[in-house]
Amino acid sequence: MDYRQTADWLTDRIPESPVAGIILGTGLNLLAEILERKITIPYEEIPGFVKSTSPSHLGNFIFGYLSGKPVVCFQGRFHFYEGYSMEQVVFPVRVLAILKAKVLIVTNASGSLRQDFAPGDIVVLKDHINFMGTNPLIGINDNALGERFPSMNLQYSTRIQDVLSSIAQQNKIELKWGTYLAVTGPSLETKAECSMFADLGADLVGMSTVPEVIVARHCGMEVLGISIVTNYSNLFHDLAHSQDEIRTNANKASSNLKLIITDLFAKM
């Protein structure tokens, strides 16, 4: 299915083009509650979309209004570890670009590689490391979307980060700043791997986000990346991780995240 055909299909079902899209990561489904006048379409009904099989990813395309602005929330994402191709993983972002959205906000749950990044912390991504062994731009380039060799020098928008930082300060919400490293998963990282990732300059590790960011930048969209720390990596303990732990710690940050994202759209 061509993403242009999917965009045409969605255009017939939503009242106007969104100004932005928000991808909600593990445990962050409830952020979609901040939208008003919602139109919800399950992924399974959308031509070209696949089924989200990850725990706690509800799998809905939700159009609505945030601070009066038209927005799309992707309630869950597709992951490379689910067995989908990179083309399928980033398909929603390309559809969003065809729908004329100019901004992508991408969120995720992550493991901390630093002791001062605690579960429940909100971390603004300042950079990333692609450790997934592949790239979503491999293959024939769509010149109508972007150039063959897009620069990754400013993949995260400093303009949007500055607005977000000001909002957080006004509301006495602490933000941290870090570099996210993406792996394929689905097995969680070993202690030796985490040690190597920290030595490479990563502060957080997860299994998503980077492919979507690369494609959004290829399409010329501004990107804001936000990671919620849901667990310490096993650099700091020898306990097994659980999905319950990850969801619980994601929920800790939800109320603050709702507040700053709502204010962000009011000021953008």
Image (cartoon, rainbow, N blue to C red):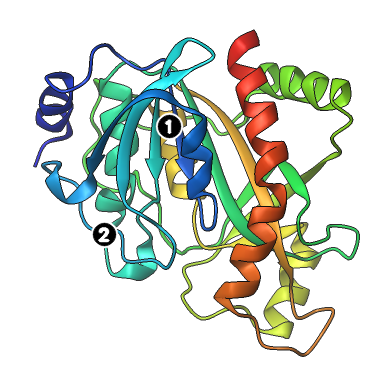
Residue type indicated by callout 1: Ala
Q: Is residue 186 left or right of residue 110?
A: left
In the rendering, at what x and y percent does residue 238 appear?
77, 90
Mark on residue 85? 2
In the rendering, at what x and y percent does residue 51 appear?
23, 58
Residue type indicated by callout 2: Ser
Q: Secondary structure at mark 2?
A: loop
Residue at 43%, 18% (x, y): give it. Answer: 65
Res 6 → quadrant: top left
Q: Secondary structure at mark 1?
A: helix
| Quadrant occupied by the C terminus | top right
Q: Nearer the viewer, residue 103 or 22?
A: 22
Residue at 36%, 63% (x, y): give it. Answer: 80
Mark on residue 139? none
| Quadrant occupied by the N terminus | top left
In the rendering, at what x and y percent does residue 251 appear?
64, 54
Mark on residue 216? 1
